[in-house]
Amino acid sequence: MRENVAHALSASPTPGVKVKAPREDGILDHALPAIRTTVVTLVLTGLLYPLVMTGIARGLFRGRAEGSFVTDGAGKVVGSELMAQGFSSPGYFRPRPSAAGGKGYDPLASGGSNLGPTSRKLRDQAAGELAKLQKENPDAPGLVPIELVTASGSGLDPHLTPGAALWQAPRVARARDVSLDRVRALVDEYTDGRDLGMLGERRVNVLMLNLALDRRLGAPPAGPAAQPAVSAGSKG
């Protein structure tokens, strides 16, 4: 009982002394810390971090950081290793069909056709590609690889499987008037293995392979020109 009374007396204000009531927080007391946190976060993650990462990337992997551009023998930029380009000349390997943009292979309109498996338009397009490939590749071995008939999700996939490239080799060899073995050897040379030996699949970069064709075998005889983005560099 005595302890309770002593506690009550100690908690009571001293007579004659004014006790200041606690101040209620205003809106600025909450807003200013939030603003400071936002500014610091923006500076760190929106400015400093990107600048540091970009600097490291350009210092260690300059080519990749700047777009993986490819040059011809004259040093002129003719494309990027990361994006497919269309080739129409029979003397060049062709990538997968593209639905990116009105004419395909448009780097500013990357995307698929969004046509489903029940779409009649998709079936007609695939049938058209199939008939065209069979007509242009009468000496090709076996069935037409499915990837040469269907577009990728981005429309800009720069790679083919080695099988799809080798399927086109007879047409390329005939158009360039060289032996089939020489063309097949180039395909094998430019076939990339799995990443780290186990990730992904073996693949061939079509642009790099076509540029190698011109460097090793010379430009193909005059015929239908490749699309502008490639024809400028295919004579390197």
Image: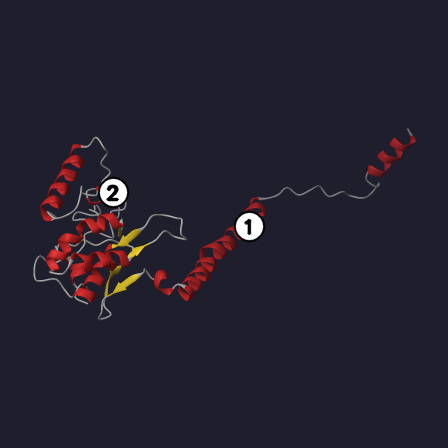
Name the residue: 50% across, 53% down.
Answer: 41
**Residue 193 showing in the rendered view:** yes
Q: Is residue 219 left or right of residue 72?
A: left
User: Is residue 196 depicted above or below 21 in this figure?
Assistant: below
**Residue 156 showing in the rendered view:** no
- Which residue is situated farthest in the right direction here? 2
Name the residue: 37% across, 65% down.
Answer: 62
Q: Which residue is mark 2?
A: 112
Q: Pick the residue in front: 96 or 20.
A: 96
Q: Secondary structure at mark 2?
A: loop
Q: Pick the residue in front: 67 or 233.
A: 233
- Which residue is situated farthest in the bottom direction here? 74
Q: CA distance from mark 2 to mark 1?
A: 47 Å
Q: Please identify the quarter of the rendering in which residue 73 is found.
A: bottom left
Image location (x, y in percent) of residue 69 = 29, 62
- Which residue is situated farthest in the top direction here? 1
Q: Are marks 2 and 1 in contact (CB under 8 Å)?
A: no
Name the residue: 23% across, 68% down.
Answer: 76
Observer-side mark, 2 or 1, equals 2
Q: In terms of sequence position, does the residue under pointer 2 or pointer 1 come before the other?
A: 1
Q: Is residue 10 left or right of residue 88?
A: right
Image quarter in which the N terminus is found: top right
Q: Is residue 222 left or right of residue 150?
A: left
Q: Which residue is mark 1?
A: 32
Image location (x, y in percent) of residue 158 = 26, 52
Image location (x, y in percent) of residue 230 = 18, 60
**What is the three-letter code of the residue carrying label 2?**
Gly
User: Is residue 223 depicted above or below 118 in this figure?
Assistant: below
